Amino acid sequence: QVQLVESGGGLVQAGGSLRLSCAASGSIFNINAMGWYRQTPGEQRELVATITRGSSTNYAYSVKGRFTISRDNAKNTVYLQMNSLKPEDTAVYYCYAETYPGILKVDYWGKGTLVTVSS
């Protein structure tokens, strides 16, 4: 089992910045990739950014150049630095961990943190 706890959400004006953090605990040695997804009411959860254990990153097109994902393996924490925020970035942001306790992949999710960007 892996537990994920997000922090850092809040209200910010358009053009501002926020940094989200996600601390992992439990069976962290099984974690491969971590990342962030977001969801707005009535919409499907969408990928924002992911980072592998080897620090390879992947970003949604809509956030490239504005958001940066990073990972501190010593602290078992992943970060999402969000700059030049837009109202359309408003969503609940969920931390995600991909684990391989055995052959099969098991995904874990945090409870989410709300990011609101005002215009």
Image: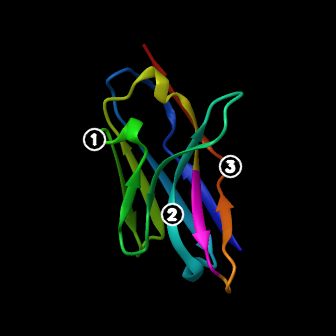
Q: CA distance from mark 3 to mark 1?
A: 26 Å
Mark 3 vs 1, N-terminal side? 1
Question: Magenta segment: does it hold 5?
Answer: no
Q: Which residue is mark 3?
A: 111
Q: Which residue is mark 1?
A: 65
Mark 3 Cα within 10 Å, few/some/many (few <14, many 20+)? few
Residues at marks 2 and 1 touching, judged by CB atoms closer than 8 Å: no
> Residue 61's image quarter?
top left
On the image, the x and y values in percent for residue 21 come to 47, 52
Give the secondary structure at mark 3. loop
Residues at marks 3 and 2 touching, judged by CB atoms closer than 8 Å: no
Mark 3 vs 2, N-terminal side? 2
Mark 3: amino acid: Lys
On the image, the x and y values in percent for residue 1 come to 71, 74
Q: CA distance from mark 3 to mark 2?
A: 15 Å
What's the image's color scheme?
rainbow
> Residue 82's image quarter?
top left
Q: CA distance from mark 2 to mark 1?
A: 19 Å
Residue depth check, mark 3 versus mark 1: number of the one nearer the observer: 1
Q: Is residue 47 found left or right of 57 in the rendered image? A: right
Residue at image location 60% in from the left, 56% down from the top: 5
Mark 2 vs 1, N-terminal side? 2
Mark 2: amino acid: Met
Give the residues in magenta. Answer: 95-100
Magenta part, dominant SS: strand
Image quarter in which the C terminus is found? top left
